[in-house]
Image (spheres, rainbow, N blue to C red):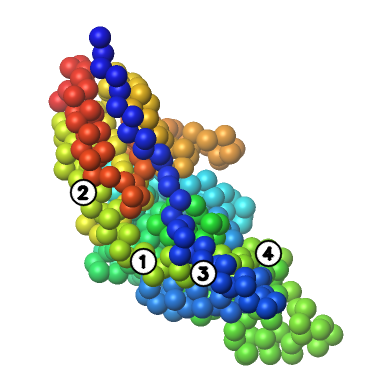
Amino acid sequence: MKPTPVNLDWPLMKNNIVRADLDAAIDFLKQDDPRLTQARQVMQFEDEWSAWLGVRHSVFVNSGSSANLITLAALRQLYGPGEVLVPTLTWVSDVAAVIQNGFTPVFVDIDPRTLGMDCRQIIDKLSSRTRAVFITHVLGFNAVTEELLKELARRRIPLIEDACESHGTTFQGRKVGSLGWASNFSFYYAHHLSTVEGGMACTDDPELYETLRMFRSHGLVRECRSADIRASYQAKHPDLNPEFIFAFPAYNVRSTEINAIIGRSQLKRLDEKNDVRRKNFEIFLQHLDPEKYQTDFAVEGSCNYALTLVLRQADHDLCREVMETLTSHKVEFRRGMAGGGNQLRQPYLQPWMKGIDLASFPCVEHAHFFGFYLGNYPGLEEEKIHTLCGLLNRLPASRAVRV
């Protein structure tokens, strides 16, 4: 008889919001006539986040997807139409924002050690039509190289960083999200930092910053911090009420004071919690069988939102055993890695698949069929990691695919 499976009770996510965060929001609500929509708390959260990240400007919005949307809208406004290089392994809203803003997506396969775009392939696909490279730091790995940053700077091509899953990840001592022209973060339910729902668009570029502020709020010129920009629009449009000049056909993706208060509370302990996530991932990789599972990820500077489990070989039998083991021991997982796996297989991209051969993207295809991610959060017990690694290591690999 098979032994009764151990119930590891290991969910994919756990809520990061704790009592102290709720108390901070309650204290705010106890004030007489508190203003709940975007106001002083939002501004303070933006300033504190900018200081933590190491950038000049941040714009708080209602989701990471909205941060993507207004950043690509600003890119279109400032650089015009063209192509944007995008990952094949990412969240849907990255590629969707590119398409929604009238750009042509150019897809790049992944680097198996970072799960991000292969930087050599990015450089090979740059052209006079390239308006930006939109890179994703997948699940807490850094996805850039010095060579890529230098080449983009030489060609004056903007780098947009999706760091939604990578708060605290670093490259050469700098936090990802501070490396390019713009970056986007998500503060969803169980990300490194949560505001319930929320996101941030960040930049050092003052023109981009003002454009993002306008795109966040209907295109209203009054949202600009720059008095010169406001005065310029007013001078050009004397027939309009200065409070209601709409520069762009934009959006309303503002967040609230309550979300900002929760974010400010969480930010105080973000670095401490990130240290636990890093330790969890190190233990996981150290105790996996490197002949069966990939353990040579580029972990320097990483701050992993999840534990990545990728089969070393395209072993269908082992893949089935892994899924059965995870399920029977109550370990929640997602097959295909971030965002549902290879985006080129998703229905929304089929109109863009003309002339694209999936065989040209072998690395993301392997991650799609033989890759998984598991929950990684500060409360994850080290004993559970050891137990799971032992279970996985005992699974038989198919001899036919062994190297």
Q: Label 2 near label 4: C-beta < 8 Å?
A: no
Q: Is residue 167 visible?
A: yes
Could you tell me which secondary element the residue under label 4 belongs to?
loop
Of label 4 and label 3, which has the lower sequence position?
A: 3
With respect to residue 321, does 206 lie above or below?
A: below
Q: CA distance from mark 4 to mark 3?
A: 26 Å
Dot 1 or dot 3, earlier in sequence = 3
Q: Which residue is mark 1?
A: 269
Q: Which residue is mark 2?
A: 282
Query: Which residue is drawn at the image coordinates 49% and 33% (left, top)?
Result: 345
Nearer the viewer's eye, disc 2 or disc 1? 1
Q: Is residue 337 visible?
A: no
Question: In whole angstroms, how far apart are the C-alphas of marks 4 and 1?
Answer: 30 Å
Return the residue at label 3.
Answer: 24
Q: Amino acid at mark 2?
A: Glu
Tell me whether circle 4 and circle 1 mark residues in contact (CB < 8 Å): no
Question: What's the distance in space between the residues labelled 3 and 2, CA to CA?
Answer: 33 Å
Q: Earlier in the sequence, mark 4 or mark 2?
A: 4
Q: CA distance from mark 4 to mark 2?
A: 41 Å
Question: 270 and 248: which one is in front?
Answer: 270
- Horizontally, residue 60 falls left or right of residue 193, namely right
**First of labels 3, 2 by sequence position:** 3
